[in-house]
Amino acid sequence: MAAEKTKPVDVAVGILMQPNGDVLLGQRPPGKPYPGYWEFPGGKVEVEESILEALKREFMEELGIEVLSAQPWCCVEHVYPHAHVRLHFYISREWRGEPQSLEGQAFAWQGSLGVEPLLPATIPLIEWLDRLRYPSA
Ligand SMILES: Nc1nc2c([nH]c(=O)n2[C@H]2C[C@H](O)[C@@H](COP(=O)(O)OP(=O)(O)OP(=O)(O)O)O2)c(=O)[nH]1
């Protein structure tokens, strides 16, 4: 069945934002679709899990970070050849711990984004994010 005719898979995605506007990105590891592409950390929401619960679980599993609070920001749907995803982006300014590479992935704090390539569904968000981070620019 073509991916666009399938029910979307919910994905919880977190944007950790420092007071200066820097945000945390991770690089997708080998073995996943789009290996080497940069993304905001997160992953698929499991059955009977809320989006916020999934977000907190993924941050702990991938980075050893405890997300203390996060607010829903925007939702984007995208049809990839491998999946139809519904991405729930949350912004968090409150967390505990320093990111650790628990799954062997690279990560980077970024101001104006310098890492490439980004996952296709994430690209439009960068402009919206910059308007939020740098309102006077
Ligand atoms: N985490 C994340 N996923 C994104 C972003 N943009 C984007 O299109 N996606 C897509 C890529 C994947 O199809 C999906 C995330 O699924 P995933 O396979 O990485 O999730 P997971 O960690 O739960 O993986 P797994 O259990 O299946 O191994 O969302 C983004 O900025 N962050």
Image: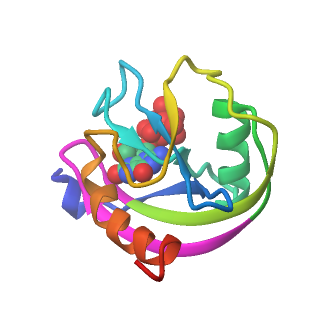
Q: Position of residue 63 (x, y in %)?
A: 67, 32
Q: Give the magenta part as a residue range.
A: 70-85
Q: Residue at x 66, y 52 (%)?
A: 55
| Residue farthest along the bottom direction in this orientation | 136
Q: Quadrant of the C terminus?
A: bottom left
| Horizontal relation, residue 75 to residue 109: left or right | left
Indicate whether 129 appears above or below 32. below
**Relative to residue 129, is residue 51 drawn left or right?**
right
Please state which of residues 66 and 98 is positioned toward the viewer in this rendering.
Answer: 98
The colour scheme is: rainbow
Q: How many marks?
A: 0
Q: Residue at x 72, y 62 (%)?
A: 93
| Ligand 1 image position (quadrant) | top left
Depth check, front residue: 12 or 118: 118
What residue is drawn where x is 30% and y is 45%?
A: 118
Q: Position of residue 77 (x, y in %)?
A: 33, 67
